[in-house]
Image (cartoon, helix red, strand yellow):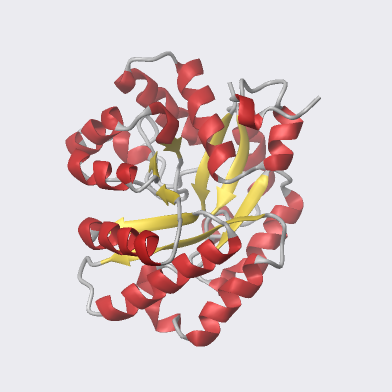
Amino acid sequence: MPLVDTHVHLNFDTFAGDLDTLAQAWRQAGVLALVHSCVEPGEFEAMQGIADQIPELYLSIGLHPLDMDKWDDATAAQIAELATSDRRVVAIGETGLDFYKASDEVVQRDAFWRQLLIAHNLGLPVIIHCRDAARATAEMIREFQRTVGPITGVMHCWAGTPAETEWFLELGFYISFSGIVTFKNAHQVKAAAQAVPDNRLLVETDCPFLSPEPCRKERRNQPAFVYHVAAYLAQLRQVDFETLAQTTTRNALTLFDLTELRLSFSADIDCPPQLTPAS
């Protein structure tokens, strides 16, 4: 069954010179599409170069909350410009809030809000990084939806509690689980993963970080390992692997509006009516 890895960083040095081997591995594992997240706009040209080699790779553009030294009006304008410069861009991010040891909360909030505004104006989802900031993140999204308009996206590499998870579900967001959910002591993440409804569930690797069991000893995570995340979630949620794969793939196609992919693979994916191409 097909899978979509909704969060990768293939431009990192650890993958240099190895993309062909990695691509062969993820294709054999059933990965039919990947979303390449962005840490800061300076990465975008390298990301495009990788996507030129890998037709199943889609892109996002944004500024990570741990890179606020790069945030200013010019960066905001650059994100907006790059988001419309390449048809492979399917999201804004990763953006969000990270208050772990943070001393720049005010700047983070400004950057997050303005990236939400870019996403809203362009009709794109946001990829959200959230660490020690679930309440503040939910409050900002709620205020944005109230005062500006609709916004949706994904809480990526989610590690929050079931209660925090519910906040974002109520806001219309998807929840994506990485290899963390397979870790022995990740009890609250497992509980959250059991609580997410089928139509909001996504899977990712966040590679090269967070290799899942049974690959924890391999320090470099890779997209093929999303299979293990999906297999573990299927077991945790007491469904067969095929059902879990079909569900998460359908959700990824919907959230990121992967139109070309839907058309190309519609015969292989059991799409809901709104995703089935007209005959």
Residue at position x 45%, y 47% from top?
Answer: 220
Residue 251 in the image: above or below residue 207: above
- Judging depth in this view, the residue of 24 and 116 nearest the camera is 116
Which residue is at 20% across, 70% downward? 101
Rendered-image quadrant of the N terminus: top right
* Figure quadrant of residue 136: bottom left
Q: For this rendering, which residue is in front, 71 or 207?
A: 71
Task: Check the image and report above or below for 251 versus 239.
Answer: below
Q: How many marks?
A: 0
Residue 202's x, y, as percent? Answer: 44, 37
Residue 91 in the image: x percent, y percent?
55, 56
Q: Position of residue 194 (x, y in %)?
A: 28, 27
Q: Residue at x 45, y 37 (%)?
A: 203
Horizontally, residue 179 falls left or right of residue 167, namely: right
- Between 244 and 215, the one nearer to me in the picture: 244
In the displayed structure, 196 sits above or below 209; it is above
Where residue 11 sits: x, y (%)?
58, 59
